[in-house]
Image: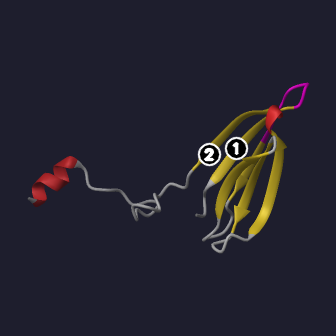
């Protein structure tokens, strides 16, 4: 979903390098996979077609942080909308 992003911190030997991969358009998402000593971060479309891909050696990765978009797609909550608090729910009963 647009707004998803993954932050990758790499040890370059002389310091740390930070990379950020973000879903840039609506309907795209960021997927992370690990295989054969490599970490692959890809921005993919709804159909699973990769748009951009970044690969890192797993032995050099210091941190991998996933930042989901503000709204939770599974619960149907939209970004910028708030859910009802306990007081509001009680008043509806």
Q: At which x and y percent is residue 60? A: 83, 33
Helix, strand or loop at disc 2? strand
Residue 63, percent across and down? 70, 34
Indicate the quadrant where residue 25 lies: bottom right
Q: Are marks 2 and 1 in contact (CB under 8 Å)?
A: yes
Please tell me which residue is depicted at 12% across the width and 60% down the height of the picture.
92
Q: How many other residues sit within 10 Å of disc 2, few (<14), some (14-19) or many (≥20)?
A: some
Q: Residues within 10 Å of mark 1 (few under 14, many from 20)?
A: some
| Position of 33 relative to 48 (above/below) | above
Residue located farthest toward the bottom when viewing the structure as drawn: 47
- Report, in whole angstroms, how far the alpha carbon at label 2 lies from the one at label 1: 6 Å
> Quarter holding the N terminus?
bottom right
Q: Is residue 45 left or right of residue 58?
A: left
Q: Which residue is mark 2?
A: 66
34 over 28 or under it: above or below: above
Give the x, y percent position of residue 77: 40, 62
Residue found 61% across the figure and 56% down from its top: 4
Q: Which mark is residue 7?
A: 1
Q: Which residues are magenta?
A: 12-18
Please provide percent x and percent y for residue 46: 63, 72
Secondary structure category for the residue under label 1? strand
Q: Tell me where residue 81 sits by quadrant.
A: bottom left
Residue drawn at x 67%, y 61% is 23
Among numbered discs 2 and 1, the one appearing first in the sequence? 1
């Amino acid at each position: 979903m647009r707004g998803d992003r993954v932050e990758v911190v790499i040890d370059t030997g002389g310091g740390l390098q930070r990379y950020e991969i973000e879903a840039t358009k609506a309907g795209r998402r960021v997927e992370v996979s690990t295989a054969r000593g490599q970490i692959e971060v890809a921005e993919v479309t709804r159909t699973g077609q990769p748009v951009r891909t970044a690969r890192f050696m797993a032995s050099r990765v210091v941190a991998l942080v996933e930042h989901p978009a503000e709204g939770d797609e599974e619960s149907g909550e939209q970004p910028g909308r708030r859910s009802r608090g306990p007081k509001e729910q009680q008043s509806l009963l």
